[in-house]
Amino acid sequence: MRSFRLLLALPLLTLLGGIPTADAAPKAAKGASAQEKPLPKIEATGIAEFDVVFMQAKTIHDALDAEDKQLVEARKQVAIALGVAEDQPLKTAFDELKKSANGKLKVALKGKMPRLEATDAIPENVQAGIDAVNKLLDAGEHAIDTGAKLVPEAKALADACIAFPGQLTTMGLDPMKLMESTKKVGNNVKAIGATPERVDRLVKTSEGVFTDVKGAFGE
């Protein structure tokens, strides 16, 4: 089990410039990202040649938001299955599962990521807890894979729109439209530039789940 964190990090190592620290991952897993400064949003500008790029980038951001929501929902289901408050750390839920399983749990590396397995017959409520944790792990793996796939496209779109702000003054827009477009285009370019940060948050949240699983059930 000592290798699973390395396996987790490799797909994004070159994309994000490193692996989140062990201290950062559990913090993100507890919902710290929700308390951080909101990342900028992408909106249509009404300039067709710009919006082609902006809406592609928005699709990427929507996909990352969907992954984050799936992680939040999966974490909620772990708390429900194990009868702990939703605002408690994952460790609290995992400790409850360990207690109920009475030593009949192990972590098995399946593919690139860990999953929980029962080593003997267990009650239905314990199996429900195992299933909920594994679904959370599935969500984390899916989130990381999605982020890895989207980053190259996001970088290409960022390159495509970097010159947009400077092009506005050549379009013959009236002063009010120019002022409005300048703000929207600037915000959108900033938002697209923040895509790696969005992916980084998603990875840290997912890695925090795996870190907590290893800490609770691993070697």
Image (cartoon, rainbow, N blue to C red):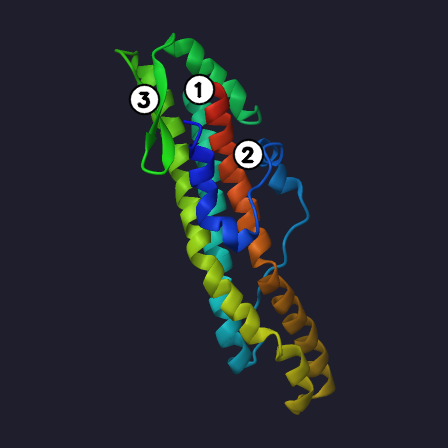
Residue drawn where x is 48% and y is 42% of the image: 9
Q: Residue 175: percent from the left, percent from the top?
A: 73, 85
Residue that mark 2 sits on: 29
Residue that mark 1 sits on: 219
Residue closer to the observer: 171 or 12: 12
147, above or below 209, in the image:
below
Q: Amino acid at mark 3?
A: Glu
Q: Residue 34: percent from the left, percent from the top?
A: 61, 41
Residue that mark 3 sits on: 117
- Quarter of the image where the N terminus is located: top left
Q: Residues within 10 Å of mark 3 (few under 14, many from 20)?
A: some
Res 216 seen here: yes
Residue closer to the observer: 10 or 28: 10
Question: Distance between the Cα atoms at labels 2 and 1?
Answer: 21 Å
Q: Residue 138: percent from the left, percent from the top?
A: 37, 37
Is label 1 in a helix, a strand or a loop?
loop
21, above or below 2, in the image:
below
